[in-house]
Structure formats: C-alpha cells, structure tokens
Amino acid sequence: MNSPVNKKHEPIPDVGLRILRSRRQTMHYKDLVAEIVTERGELPIGGPEHLAQVLTQINLDARFVHMGKGYWGLKDWAGGQQKPIPVVIPGEGEYLPKPEDYRLVDEEDDHDDESDLLIPVADDEEEAFADEESDAQSSDDEENEDDE
C-alpha cells in the first residue's frame, strides 16, 4: 500500500471505501476505524471522541451501510440483503364501516339530564326523609348552642 504520509489528507470515507473494497468483506466498526486511522498515518485511536469522529463520517457517507451487529459494508453489497419496505395503499384490504356500525343518538340525548339519575320515591317516604333531615339539623343546632 502507499505510504501513510500521502494519505493523511485523504478523506476518511474514501480510505474506508478503499479498505472495504480491497478486503471484499464486511468489517467490524472497531477494526475498520483502526485500519482507517493506520492508513491515514494518524496516531492510534486516542479515545471515544476520535472513534466517534471517524465512525460518524462513515455513517454519514451514503456509500456505506450498517450490516448489523457492528459490521459495516458497502451499499453495493447490500442490494439483495435489504428488507423491502411494505407499502400500504388506503382502501385495499381495509375495513370500510357500514351504516349499521354507527349508533344513532336522539337529539334529546344531546344534553346532560341528571333527572335520569334520580330514583322515584313514594310521597310518604319523602315526608319521612324530610322529617329525619329536620330532626338531624335541629340536634346539630342544639349541640352548637351547648358548646357556646
């Protein structure tokens, strides 16, 4: 291969492309990045920032494709391996509602009517309940007078 000094200014994606084409197989991202750095004549990867910088440039280049489990390859190689994207055409195979599916609501039911919630009570029971209420209220008044 050429001397690393001449390749220092070569773009990272171009070096990666050349490496993958010469190997003719996918590479794990750590191995690919390490080889790119070596080819460019740079110091070995000096930390996660340097690794991220090189990997980001590869990721942004459309010629590369992530093959899964950390392996990168060329887009040319992935032609038959890409999963087809399902296309959904509205109206085909979808359920279309029928008029019977809808419950028609009477206009009278449009407002909240709490009278529907009341339970009818016989007149004599209503009077007895009113007497109990007044007795309870008067005993409360007497207790309050005693407290004063």
Image (cartoon, rainbow, N blue to C red):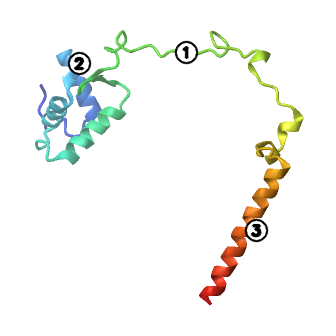
Q: Which residue lies furthest to the right in this view?
A: 107
The answer to which image quadrant residue 55 occupies is top left
Residue type highlighted by circle 1: Val
Disc 3 versus disc 1: distance between alpha carbons?
Answer: 73 Å
Left or right? Give the position of 17 relative to 144. left
- Indicate which disc residue 134 carries: 3
Residue type highlighted by circle 3: Ser
Q: Which residue shows up at 55% across the image and 15% down it?
A: 87
Crowding around mark 2 (Cα neighbors within 10 Å: few <14, some 14 to 19, many 20+) is few
Left or right? Give the position of 135 relative to 89. right
- Return the disc, 3 or 1, that comes first in the chain's sequence: 1
- In the rendered image, residue 122, in percent from the top left (x then y), is placed at 82, 46
Residue type highlighted by circle 2: Arg
Q: Which residue shows up at 30% across the image and 20% down it?
A: 74
Residue at which label 1 appears:
87
Residue at which label 2 appears:
21
Q: Is residue 68 above or below residue 140?
A: above
Crowding around mark 1 (Cα neighbors within 10 Å: few <14, some 14 to 19, many 20+) is few
- In the rendered image, residue 144, in percent from the top left (x then y), is placed at 64, 82
